[in-house]
Image (cartoon, helix red, strand yellow):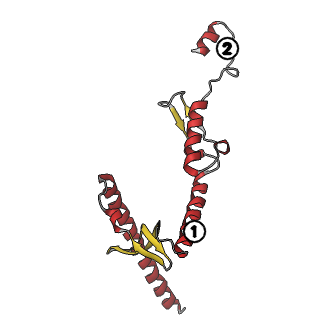
Amino acid sequence: MSAEVLKQRGVYDPKKLFGLMTPETELARAFVAERFVLYVEDVHVPVIGGHCSLTALPLFSKTTPPYREYFEARGAERFVLSLLRALGGANDMFQCCFVESNMFEDIPFFGSTVKLGKKGVEAIIETDLEGLTEYEVKSLKTLRKGLSLQRITRRFSEFMRQYLFSFLGL
C-alpha cells in the first residue's frame, strides 16, 4: 500500500522502500537458538515471503551456523557424555543407537533406544514399537524393506568379494 501512495505522488523509489520482517526473523532465530542451546545473536535464519506468520517462510536449511552440523556435533557430545556417565555408574542413561538386535528376524542391526551401563548396552527398549501411529507403522514397514535390502546387498558384496578373490587367486 505504501508503494502505491508513493507512486501516486511521483516519489516512489524501490531502493528506498522496504518493510521489516523482524518479528518473523526473531521468532525463527529464537526457535533455533532455543532448540540448539545457542545465543539468539549468533543465529541467522533467512525468512522469505510475506509479512505475517501465514505468508512468511523461514528457511531453516539455510540457517547459520549450519544447524545440521551443530546438531550432529551436539548429538555426538550428548552420546559421549551419556556413555561416560553410564561407565561411571549412572543407571538412567538412555540413547538411540544403531545396535545388533533381534527385534526383526530379517534385520540384524536396528536403531533403537538402549539403556547404557558400565559394560555397554544393558538393554534394548523394545516398547518403542508399541502404540505407533498409522504414519509411523507405514514408515517402519518402508524402512524395514530398506534395511533388509542393505543386508541382501551386503551379503551379495561379501559373496562377490570371496568369489572374485578365489577366482583371482587372492
Q: Return the x and y of residue 136 as percentages of the image width and height.
A: 34, 56
Q: Is residue 164 left or right of residue 139?
A: right
Quadrant placement of the N terminus: top right
Q: Is residue 106 above or below residue 43?
A: below
Disc 1 residue crowd, few under 14, some 14–19, many 20+, Cα 10 Å? few
Question: At 62% across and 51% down in the image, what residue appears?
Answer: 66
Please, what secondary structure does the residue beneath circle 1 have? helix
Q: Return the x and y of residue 165 as percentages of the image width and height.
A: 51, 88
The part of the image, by quadrant, that contains residue 18 is: top right
Q: Is residue 9 above or below residue 36?
A: above
Q: Residue furthest bottom?
A: 169
Q: Which residue is mark 2?
A: 12
Please, what secondary structure does the residue beneath circle 2 have? loop
First along the sequence among labels 1 and 2? 2
Find out whether the residues at labels 1 and 2 contact each other: C-beta distance under 8 Å.
no
Q: Which residue is mark 1?
A: 80
Q: Return the x and y of residue 144 as percentages of the image width and height.
A: 35, 65
Q: Tell how many labels.
A: 2
Quadrant placement of the C terminus: bottom right
Q: Is residue 160 above or below residue 74?
A: below
Q: Mark 2 belongs to which amino acid?
A: Tyr
Q: Judge by depth and name the residue closer to the eye, 170 or 154.
A: 154
- Tag in front: 1 or 2: 1
